[in-house]
Image (cartoon, rainbow, N blue to C red):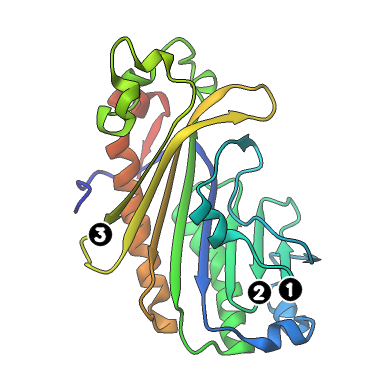
Amino acid sequence: MPFPDVQRVIYKRNPLEQVICQLRFPPILKIDAEIPAEFQDKVRKDYPNFSEISEWKKVGIPRAVKGQIPPEALRQVLQPPGNKNYEFSSENGQWQVNLTRTFIALTADNYERWEEFKDKLVDPLDALIAVYSPAHFSRIGLRYINVIRRSVLDLGDVSWSDLLQPYVLGILSSPGVGEHVQNFENRYEIRLSDGESVARVTTGFVQHVDDGEIGYMIDNDFYNTDKTSLDAAIEKLDYFNKRASRLIQWCITDRLHQAMEPQIL
């Protein structure tokens, strides 16, 4: 625990806007010093597009929504000026690998299931280890950004209190008060049962850029800042993935669960 075990499902009407895996390591100056040609050769099959980003790069902020981003989250995902950020992306642009001298990250804009995501991570991770040999990982993170949009779930007239648990909604669940809340943000850091990892849960309203609809964001960032050996990274990510499945179902009511059309695996 702390989140109760549940049956694993895949939602046909998936609320995920983005999933990001980031693995940090002690600075490798070679990544800044030369173009990552050898790394590119090893990942080009799945990530043929390449760009070098010289400005500050936001890794892990959904493009489809806008809203307040916690300052701590911004500090984690912004790469300071002067540090090169190499981006390798798939043909359809829905998968991106970012490589800097302090981290490698994989971002999925159309996440369906963990097995596919993990498979997409294998080549970039193997390439990082083969080409640059990081000593260890100093931070491992797996982040799920869910945005509940009632219109796409045919729930346009349903109140948030019927879709989300009261302990997630906070004041929004209060009769006579919740409907007057214009904006809010809740943030919690929860120690996981392994005694060393944390789930940072951020919830709040976000606005969709296309139609202005107000959605409810559940941003779950699972991370570990202990020194982790290279061969233990995938096991830790598997652990985070299982807790993410538990957490999202812990947040929602059965009505929302059914509206998202769960497919049992």
Number of numbered labels in the structure image: 3
Kind of residue indicated by mark 1: Lys
Neighbour class for label 2 at 10 Å: few (<14), some, many (≥20)?
many
Q: Earlier in the sequence, mark 3 or mark 2?
A: 2
Which residue carries the number 3 mark? 192
Mark 1 or mark 3: which comes first in sequence? 1
Tell me the quadrant of the picture where the N terminus can be found.
Answer: bottom left
**Residue 240 image-quadrant placement:** bottom left
- Residue 173 is situated, as x and y percent measured from the top left of the image, at 30, 21
Q: Quadrant of residue 134?
A: bottom right
Q: Residue at x 72, y 65 (%)?
A: 87
Q: Is residue 5 visible?
A: yes
Q: Disc 3 and disc 2: Cα gap in Å?
A: 29 Å
Q: Is residue 83 above or below residue 248?
A: below
Q: Quadrant of the C terminus?
A: top left
Residues at circles 2 and 1 in contact by the CB criterion of under 8 Å: yes
Q: Classify mark 2: helix, strand or loop.
A: loop
Residue situated in front as seen by the camera: 84 or 249:
84
Query: According to the image, label 2 marks what residue?
Result: 100
What secondary structure is found at the residue carrying circle 1?
A: loop
Task: Mark yes or no: residue 14 visible.
Answer: no
Q: Is the residue marked by circle 1 packed among few (<14), some (14-19), or many (20+) residues within 10 Å?
A: many
Q: Which residue is mark 1?
A: 84
Q: Amino acid at mark 2?
A: Thr
- The answer to whether residue 73 is above or below residue 129 is above
N-term-proximal mark, 2 vs 1 = 1
Residue at 59%, 83% in the rendered image: 27
Q: CA distance from mark 1 to mark 3?
A: 34 Å
